[in-house]
Image: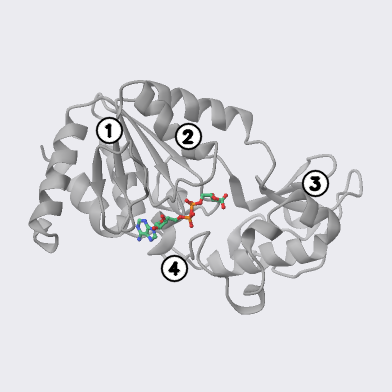
Amino acid sequence: MLAELSPALTAEVQRAAKLLASKQRICLLTGAGISAESGIPTFRDKQTGLWENYAAEDLATPDAFARDPKLVWSWYQWRRQLVADKTPNPAHDALAQWQYHTQSSDQQLTLITQNVDDLHEQAGSTVIHLHGNLWQNRCSQCNTTYENRSNRLANSKNDLIFDEDLITCQHCGGYIRPNIVWFGESLPVQAWQTAEDAASNCEVFISIGTSSLVYPAAGLAQLAKQNGAKIIEINPDPTPNTIVDITLAEKAGVIMPLLIQQITTL
Ligand code: APR
């Protein structure tokens, strides 16, 4: 299995596996790169189709929604349609397998994601979402969450409605918006607190498929490092993060199954 990798990368995977097998508290942060092999474009991939002339950063903001709610709502309906048939790839599956394996060991894994897709959940993982969830909605005025059909919002992806008509809140008449953290908005308090605690107390922090550009999530690795953790980065295009101790410059879907197989058999 490791034969797929260069001798140098094989040695780094074995070094990472040895470190991870010897430690109890592991914190993992995933980004859009872990879903890339499932066919979901990463956040900084160029947008396509009708949306190719828009940058995600210009649409995922409260101002954009206030200015043109229908445009932003349509974009998210398009993203939902793009993601609806996507399934976990070997990286998601390997992480879920590792989490399952730790149930009978003294290792504690905390999996945190910046992603708004639910591929970690589909693979069977327990995961903390820092930036919200593409399949959830809430009122932009009174924050009531909307997950049921009566508001023409599907209660599951199977009967999802992708129409672009704006939906108004039953309680206050405000427009319904995706339950996603937009640029300039604060992260969910409980999720961030859990992530900070896990990063501060872990012995190894693994960053998988993220450009580490967007704070505060990008600061978790630094927080872990300050508290004595070793840092592992899995990314075919390594970031200029100087705090990384072990760089696995390969796709997550290739590395994760090999790494987990090594860890769980050491
Ligand atoms: N395996 C691992 N990493 C990959 C793969 C892969 N198969 N394919 C791409 N990558 C890497 C890219 O090299 C890049 O560094 O994934 C990273 C994706 O970076 P971004 O597109 O910036 O996504 P992300 O880091 O998740 O963005 C963070 O920024 O825009 C906000 O809220 C948004 O959650 C998002 C946050």
* Mark found first going from the N terminus, 3 or 1: 1
Q: Dot 4: what SS?
A: loop
Question: Can you tell which quarter of the image residue 16 is in?
Answer: top left
Q: Position of residue 143 (x, y in %)?
A: 78, 40
Q: Which residue is mark 4?
A: 39
Query: How much space separates mark 4 and mark 3, taking CA atoms?
Result: 30 Å
Q: Residue furthest right?
A: 173
For label 3, the crowd category at 10 Å Cα-Cα, with few meaning under 14, some 14 to 19 and many 20 or more, is many
Question: Can you tell which quarter of the image residue 97 is in?
Answer: top left
Viewport quadrant of the N terminus: bottom left
Q: Which residue is mark 3?
A: 139
Q: Which residue is mark 2?
A: 219
Query: How much space separates mark 2 and mark 4, taking CA atoms?
Result: 27 Å
Give residue 102's mark.
1
* Mark found first going from the N terminus, 2 or 1: 1
Amino acid type for the residue under numbered disc 1: Thr
